[in-house]
Image: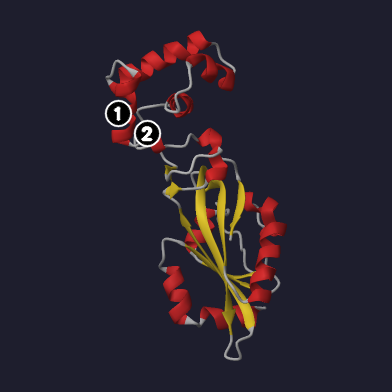
């Protein structure tokens, strides 16, 4: 194992690029054990300082992704067998700040001169926008994962999401298990924050600012989605 790690570390064109990248990079052997990761990967999974990931599998790491280890290993075996890359969306509480956010994650084979897969390389980057209908039912527009500003709370963003889809205060109340009068009061507060006086003007405000494309974090579930 150590000889293999040393061999990978000496592959400067590959690892030097990974080491200096702000995106997540790493290499695993064909048994799904880490043989190299960059600093961004450690920060991405909030790996404790001093914890050595080399030689371990995902389920042996004290991180949020351990619960998905079997899924990841299965997909890595598919990469090794097919010789083709796979693309995932991983959504969880990532980073040192442990913030719920989606990452585009790709795994592809690393071949030797005989075109035999000897390792797998993975790459991940944070998604600023998403276009995944499964997150929010039948919605297909390009969506913002982060709100354009802190003008509204997460609770208010949930109401805005329904309000912009022409749901009444009574309908929103049923969705959120709150009285329609409470929802009506909150809607008035939303109008005040946006400095408007009608739903029509509020919709225009949200369209201009990007709030009409913002997905509340409550609608985003931790998990892994395989992209064909």
* Disc with the residue nearer the chain's start (1 vs 2): 1
Nearer to us in this view, 66 or 212: 212
Q: Is residue 173 left or right of residue 12?
A: right
Q: Quadrant of the N terminus?
A: bottom right
Q: Check if mark 1's residue and mark 2's residue have beta carbons within 8 Å.
A: yes
| Residue 113 circle label | none
Res 32 visible: no
Determine the residue positioned at 32% across, 22% down.
200
Determine the residue positioned at 59% across, 41% down.
221
User: Which residue position holds label 1?
Assistant: 205
User: Which residue position holds label 2?
Assistant: 211
Nearer to us in this view, 112 or 93: 112
Q: Quadrant of the C terminus?
A: bottom right
Q: Residues within 10 Å of mark 2 (few under 14, many from 20)?
A: many
Nearer to us in this view, 201 or 224: 201
Q: Is residue 61 left or right of residue 108?
A: right
| SS at badge 1 | helix
Q: Position of residue 33 (x, y in %)?
A: 67, 69
């Amino acid at each position: 194992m150590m000889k293999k790690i040393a061999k990978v570390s000496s592959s400067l064109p590959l690892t030097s690029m990974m080491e200096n990248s702000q995106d997540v990079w790493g290499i695993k052997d064909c048994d799904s054990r880490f043989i190299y990761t960059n600093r961004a990967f450690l920060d991405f999974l909030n790996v404790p300082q001093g914890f050595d990931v080399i030689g371990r599998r995902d389920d042996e790491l004290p991180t949020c992704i351990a619960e998905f280890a079997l899924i990841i290993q299965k997909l890595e075996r598919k990469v090794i067998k097919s010789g083709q890359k796979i693309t995932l969306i991983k959504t969880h509480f990532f980073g040192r700040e442990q913030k719920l956010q989606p990452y585009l994650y790709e795994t592809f084979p690393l071949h030797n001169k005989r075109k035999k897969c000897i390792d797998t390389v993975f790459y991940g980057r944070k998604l600023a926008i998403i276009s995944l209908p499964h997150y929010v039912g039948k919605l297909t527009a390009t969506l913002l994962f982060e709100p354009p500003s802190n003008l509204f709370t997460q609770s208010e963003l949930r109401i805005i999401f329904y309000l912009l889809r022409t749901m009444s205060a009574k309908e929103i109340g049923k969705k959120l298990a709150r009285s329609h009068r409470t929802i009506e009061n909150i809607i008035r507060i939303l109008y005040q924050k946006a400095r408007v006086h009608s739903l029509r003007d509020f919709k225009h405000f949200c369209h201009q600012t990007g709030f009409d494309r913002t997905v509340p974090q409550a609608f985003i579930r931790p998990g892994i989605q395989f992209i064909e």
